[in-house]
Image: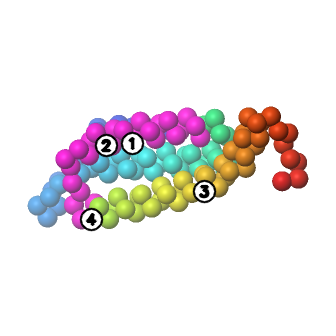
Amino acid sequence: MSMTDPQATTTPAPSEGRTMNTTLLSYYEAIERASADMLAAARAGDWDRVVKLEGACAVLISRLKHAAAGEQLAPEEAQLKTRIMQRILVNDAEIRTLAEPWLEDLDRLMAGQPKNILH
């Protein structure tokens, strides 16, 4: 996964008297890419990679929170952010669905119960 620093992006020329907040949107897009990578890893059963990517997402979210302090998005940017967040939530829901059997197996292992082959 490529985690380019969103702060390295340049702000495009003003549109209708406003500048696009590319830094904040870049963070949302980077989080979306990481969530898509997490989903691909979950589909492949690569749970170690899912965990690593989850850590990368946590770092990006922390940076986003810092960058967003006092910042506001223009209405069209807010709409883009909403669409990105919806895609992230869809990815997250599918990851959780894929993880449920793995988490149940982990719970049984922790409790010392054998895996039920017929489940």
Residue indicated by mark 2: 65
Q: Which residue is mark 3?
A: 94
Residue occupied by mark 4: 76
Q: Earlier along the polypeptide chain: callout 3 or callout 1?
A: 1
Q: Which residue is located at x 60 percent, y 56 percent?
A: 94
The residues colored magenta run 50-77
Q: From the viewer's perspective, is the residue at label 1 or at label 4 nearer? A: 1
Locate residue 10, reporting x and y percent: 24, 44
Identity, as a three-letter code, of the amino acid under mark 4:
Glu
Name the residue tied to disc 1.
61
Relative placement, left or right, of 39 versus 33 is right
Q: Is residue 62 magenta?
A: yes
Amino acid type, label 2: Lys
Report if residue 89 lies within the magenta region.
no
Amino acid tagged 1: Ile
Q: Is residue 62 above or below residue 96?
A: above
